[in-house]
Image (cartoon, rainbow, N blue to C red):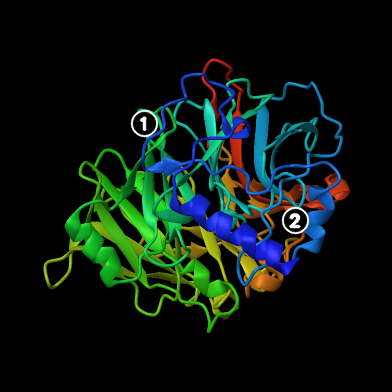
Amino acid sequence: MHQHFLAIILLAGIAVASPAPASPAEAPAEPSKIVDVDPRQISLPPIIPSIPGVTVPLGTLLPPGVILQPPTPALASPPFQGSDIKPTKIGYFWTGAGDNDHSDFLATYSLDDDTFGTLITLTDINSSGNSPHHLGPSADGQYLWGGGLLSLLKLQNTGYYFDVSNPYAPKYIKSDTALLGSIADEVRAKPDGGFFFTYLGSAAGTSPGRLIETDKDLNIIHEHPEDVNGTLNILGEQFSPHGLTIDWEKNIILTSDFIVPLSILKPTTGKVSANTLRLWDLPTRTIINTITIPNGVGIQDVKLIPGNPESAALATAVGAGQVWIVYPFRYDEQGHQGTTELFYDLGPKARDVVAIFSDITKDGRFAYFTITTGNHIAALDISDLDNPKRLDDPDEVQPTEGPHYIKITPDQKHLVVTDYFLQTGDIGIVNTPADYKALYIDLLDDGSLHFNRSIDFQKEFANRGGAKPHSSVIFDFTDPDHPVYD
């Protein structure tokens, strides 16, 4: 059996090294225009074909590699009870099957008051064990992109695309992977179509990662940086981009460097975290400067403050348990563009908590932070940047376990928080406790939180070992002629 697995890994190495044509299962179903393949992207065919009665037990018998996992095909979703209701508020949740054997999937739920938590439908992808990560909509609301954090370990594609032109019946259309990067993280839509998204690591899970760009037809067209100076920059200092925020009017990008992915997988001498952000020129896609947060120990997230005249952004320093403010148009004493300073210390219960993620209201008044292994969601009034005020009690026991991805609903009245970050299992050293719920939290007028309702993914999907919802996108059709989404 071990010899067979080694042969599989050798074949997988060939598949990664050589661009492969899309298999029939990978061919896009809709829209038909998504056909051109750029040489910067490939689509990996299944390493082991699906053979009834053979590959199902094979997944439980094959031993994991030192890092790689058996690249067995996914099991189709068990039967589920959907609904034909047409709610005005929809939550899409990018979700992994609890058993890592069944297909990962997009779950579509009603978030309306009278039908909250009703499952509308479930959309399988054609692979499993990806550890679904971040999810984002295209600028026109027709597509969703979802990244696979650990897809590389099964030698699978890392980007997954869904057609949501019918919002009540999403369709999985295709997947791809980049040539130079892997370990998918944050995503932002381009106004003219397509996406930017961060790949935390290289194709081997090391540093440097890449900032990936697609065109409007959802094909990967660039893996930034591509210029000589930028390449020297990311080779000279750890480049592990996780957070991503873009000012389209002032033509800047900020990415935040988090952790070398390979360093959380066994065998390891410990996590290798970064203390930096990169400031980019948007028109040329080149790095302007590397900005350092002293002793940040993992800068997981960065978000522009809406409406701020200086395009200031908030960045989370995970090891320090702090929030820093970044001023991309200020200059330091050496004349380098981009400065940062401590904005708010979230306290001792926020230090060394594996992950701190954030979101900010559209009016720039309130900011929210999930403190994953601290089992807490913090709220700040940031209307006065010189005097931020904490709105939650850091000692309060909140009804959450393992909160991570956080999204303010388009109407700015709720927070959607998914209680799951990452569980690498026996192959890694990051296994955060979670209750696998999607929390729907009311935002009060003063910005404080009122915990209200939730969806329990463990109960909903018990027939596949439960489910692990990592991220969400919310659509609001209150005004059907002008839907909003985020």
Q: Nearer the viewer, residue 191 or 124?
A: 124
Q: Secondary structure at mark 1?
A: loop
Left or right of residue 349, residue 466 in this image: right
Q: Would you say residue 30 is visible in this rendering?
A: yes
For the residues marked 1 and 2, what is the alpha-carbon distance in whole angstroms?
A: 33 Å
Q: Is residue 233 left or right of residue 195?
A: left
* Residue 436 badge: 2
Q: Position of residue 243 (x, y in %)?
A: 43, 56
Seen in the picture, residue 13 relative to 196 is either above or below; the reply is below
Residues packed near mark 2 inside 10 Å, few (<14), some (14 to 19) or many (20 plus): many
Q: In front: 101, or 188?
A: 101
Q: Does the rendering let one see residue 422?
A: no
Q: Nearer the viewer, residue 287 or 425?
A: 425
Report the residue at 69% width, 41% height from top. Answer: 105
Decide: is 226 above or below 10. above
Residue type (three-letter) at the residue carrying disc 1? Pro
Density class for disc 1 (Cα within 10 Å; few <14, some 14-19, many ≥20) is few
Which residue corresponds to the image point at 74% horizontal and 42% vertical from the top-left?
50
Height in image: 305 above or below 352? above
What residue is drawn where x is 38% and y is 47%? 212
Residue placed farthest to the bottom in the image?
269
Residue 174 lies left or right of residue 304; in this view the side is right
Label located before the other in sequence (1 or 2): 1
Q: Which mark is residue 191?
A: 1
**Percent x, y of residue 430:** 63, 71
Apparent side of residue 374 relative to residue 446 in the rendered image (left or right): right
The location of residue 307, given as percent across then percent down, is: 34, 44
* Closer to us: 274 or 72: 72
The quarter of the picture where the N terminus appears is bottom right
Image coordinates for residue 64, horizontal then vertical, percent: 69, 67
Q: Quadrant of residue 429?
A: bottom right
